[in-house]
Image (tube, coloured by chain):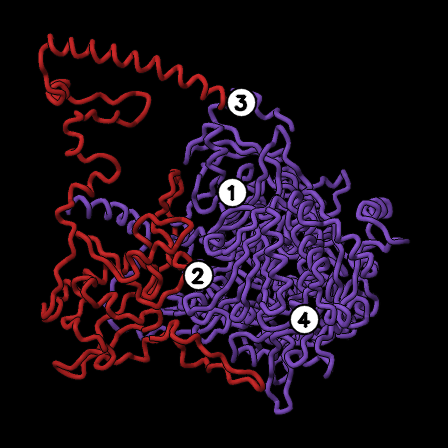
Chain colours: A purple, B red
Amino acid sequence: MAAATDLAQSYASRARAAVNAPPLPDDPEVADVTWDKAPCRFCGTGCHVQVGVQDGKVVAIAGDQQAEVNRGLLCVKGYHVGGILYGADRLTKPMLRVDGELQPIEWDQAIDIVARRILESGPKFGLYLSGQSTIPEGYVGTKLMRGGLSNNHIDANARLCMASAVTGFLSTYGVDEPAACYDDLDSCDALILWGNNPAEMHPVLFSRVVDRRVRGDKIEIFDIGTRWTRTTERANHHLLMKPHGDLAIANCVAHLLIEWGAVDQEFVSKHCNFRADRTPAELCTHDEYLAMVAEKGDSGLFGEPIDYEQYKKLISYYNPERSSELSGVPVEQLVALAKLFADKKRKITSLWCMGMNQHTAGTAINNLVHGIHLLSGHWGKPGDGPQSLTGQPSACGTVREVGTLAHALPGGRLVANPEHRADVERRWNLPQGRLNPTPGFHTVKMFEEFCKPTDQGGAIDTIWVQVTNPGQSLPNTHKLFKAKEGQPDKFLIVSEVYPTATTELADLILPAAMWVEKNGVYGNSERRTQQWFKMVEPPGEARDDCWQLLAVARRLFELGHEGLKDRDDKWLFTMRDEAGVEVPIWEWDSYYGPVNVDKALFEQYREFTFMKHKNVAPYDQLVAHRGMRWPVIETDNGGFKETRWRFVEGSDAYVEAGKGYQFYHSSTKDDRAQIWFRPHQDPAEMCNGAYPFMLTTGRVLEHWHTGTMTRRVRQLSNAMPKAYLEMNADDAREMGISNGEEVELRTIRGKMRLPVWLDGRAKPPRGTLFVPFFDETASINDLTLDAIDPFSKQPDYKKSAARVTRIADLPASGSDEVQP
Amino acid sequence: MSTRAETKATLGKRLGHMALAVTIGVSAAGFLIGVGERELPEARLASAGPRARPESSGELPPEVVDYTKMNRVNRGPNADWKQSLPAFKEAPTRFYGDESATDAERAAAVAARAERRAFSGAPPVVPHAIDERNAQACMACHGSGLKVGGVTAPKMSHHYVQNCTQCHVEGAQNAPWAFASAPAQTTFIGLSEPGRGERAGPGAPPTIPHALWMRSDCATCHGELGKEGLRSSHPWRVNCTQCHAPSRGFDWLPLDVPPPPPREGEETLVPIAGMFSP
């Protein structure tokens, strides 16, 4: 017995020693803990947590039972979200790099340096924000850049995660963001996961579906992906596909629906148009069409009309046999998926995230998935429709709605549209013509220009990064980030909470407050706007990102920058208390003073949300709720009602009575959605003799994105301490690689050493590799490709040709010389 | 494929040769054993003294065991477990047991709980290796709880939520690869485990000193399989809240944030029946 216990305990003691156990109760009274609500700091699901605060510190987290999203349940990251504030190496003092060394400086000096650098750089300055920026932060950022500096070089990391979903929504419905909501998960009969592993990435939503099985509900899950994952374990069908196979799969479904006469004629004839890159002069075949588009080029994001006969002819190319060959999915499985869509009685929800968005045909596959839902009429009923997920807590709320993208203005307005510019100038009280009509650089372009030496035409020389870690999250980081090193005229400003791959190369570091150390508003994947209050003080001299932007904006005003004055020569961000006295919000001591700056900014921004019918709720409503889904409509009795399904009569107040469905922002101005023809195309990088493996990347349950927060939480880092290389056991056996062995992984962009994990967390098919990207000590984005989708400009991280070599087999010298 | 076919063809030939070699070998060995000095294998090992560590690898070569003793020797990764087989029986059920736990027992139990949790109320980490992909295996032991030898698998304290590994992760990763990384350096100090519940007077039943959210089965900690110090002295009484009142002050729900008002034209949030409710 002793030995048995020992064995169990040797493991347990390892676990125990590694967890920093809370102190034992010396005082049984714990009622001095105060609880308040906040959205979780991590993914785009938008769970609400209850935050327990004791003696000015976060000490406990609980799932919020009153939150509609998560109903009291969280995932392991959410339960430990409180720990992210307390990593031992929090940044607490502004630091300036002097002769290569970071030296502490005072805030006044730091703000002055940023302001002067912006003045000096002019159009060569870029602001790089985040899907974790709060709505007020994003709003100040965009107003400062476009309204103050007439500079559109503002983009956000959400470009790397959901730009293809945005272009997909825009080109299909004429307006961004999902029409569906999470309520669908409670009533769908079938769930289709397009390159999505929600068991690890959106666990609370996945549980919302699979837990229904315990209650006797029958839900058929189709897992379309490139590996076996925890999600596959729960799926009824696993459609294991080749990279880019999703295009042929969706096209095959559309073809079979037509062939079987299963198109929802009523829905399509009333509410849909057909669309393609180009209108052919006459009825043409698939190959003729491709040749024509290759010659003429595409016609832009919104494409050109085609008729149903032409659509039918083009899509007929994707018969099951050919689609099976293109996608690698057996014919029977393609037919089974199409049969599901042909069945009018069943309710189908599609979910997707990075698998479809990080794709050089990302816009195309988004169009196709919307398309098969529209074509089959599985659209706009509870449980029946497509729903894209986001990876960041406010990719929707801040980046997409406020518009911190290079081409966007607040509330769905566009930089290139003169009416939109005039409207924004009027609302901001700016002189006419202040807004720059040319869209700025998208993320990849911005960092490409930043890394390109000035004497070679590099058009960006200063970037201010807030709330994100491009040094690890950009693709091909050798080219797009690390090349900055050794260029003394390039200046990188980073607002951060911990040392990261980005602060490694920073010239100025601004310590930031995070999550419940500040007020904030986020917007999740289902159009839900969520508010929280500051609960604890940030450590040391760390301060809000929003305050940092405002302080710089004030310093620019003091330095005489004309752009920071409105038409009445007042500072752009002037705020007054109830008595009408101006509050110096640029001074830290006054920031949490008589004015709730977050509320004032949010209410100002709210005015922008009505044009595209994305009406967010008033701040005070958000205080009282666990988020509300826009459009939030004021009712006759002064209440506010949220919207669950957009464009659907009875749910969306903007749909005219009797219409049933109305796509009131349709790009064709006829209240119709677009069903696109999008051909199959090969990935940007294909395997070859020298690089025979397809390398894909992604997340794991325990870590969130680049791991800067979760790797500092002991329970999470103990469970998943290090990046690994996942490969198929048969590939490993043939190469003589054993489980746990360290190997060299190489693409044409770089190489690194990683331990191989066989039959571990997930299992790839032969020829496929997977590496998670959370580990800064083995940052896989050194190796990933930076090819982008032509419309969304989102990079495709997930298909790099790679090679694996045993360490023993590496050439003794000159291994760096190997070329593809 | 062609190489595999070739291999099969040559295999037959090779087997013939091997059979011949074995026959000759056995005869020769039998002859030598017959004429040689009889010595037991273990005596030979003992006389060889402690084995030297091979320089190339850090591992000892496997110990050679006589075939006649093979079935009595514990080998392999589960050797220790086999050795304690006599102790592998269910602990006796203690009805009408101790009056109540001592302070020291209770403190030890609370300390043991705290060691697997970031704070009071956090999902505990898993102190053993898990199946990386299939969480359904958890239910084999944790579905109704289990005590074998000195090891307890606590019963789930909440109703079945399918994706166990969504909340419970390994306390230390058990993958076959080595971890160079040191534990995360943190200053986070979690909420302490609660003290005892209040009693109105001597002999009165104590109130419940903790929240009930996700803890709908009291027997998980206070039942037969619970830790010494937390066990109930009267486990046969199963309607716990008949006598032990929950204390609102310990509940997670904040009192200052009002619940959302019902929305016009839409149903209010209805919790999923039976899922979490205590």
Q: Is residue B187 above or below residue A574?
A: above
Label 2 and label 3: CA atoms lie apart by: 51 Å
Q: Is residue B62 left or right of residue A588?
A: left
Q: Where is residue B51 in the image (x, y as percent from the top left)?
A: 20, 22
Residue linked to disc 4: A573
Q: What residue type is labelled 4?
A: Phe
Assign a secondary structure to mark 3. helix
Q: Residue at x 86, y 55 (%)?
A: A279
- Estimate how packed mark 4 is, as few (under 14), some (14 to 19) or many (20 or more) residues with alpha carbons within 10 Å: some
Counting from the top left corner in percent of width and height, residue A129 is at 63, 57
Against B219, residue A12 (above or below) is above
Q: Can residue A559 be seen in this view?
A: no
Residue sitting at 25 percent across and 62 percent down? A24
**Chain letter behind tag 3:** B
Q: Badge 2: how crowded within 10 Å, few (<14), some, or many (20+)? A: many
Spatial CA span between label 1 and label 4: 52 Å
Q: What residue is disc 2 on?
A: A75
Give the residue number, with chain letter if any, for mark 3: B2
Give the residue displayed 30% in from the left and 61% down from the top: B143
Q: What residue type is labelled 2?
A: Cys
Which amino acid type is shown beneath numbered disc 3? Ser
Q: Say yes or no: labels 1 and 2 on the same chain.
A: yes
Say which chain tag 1 marks: A
Q: Residue A764 carries which label?
A: 1
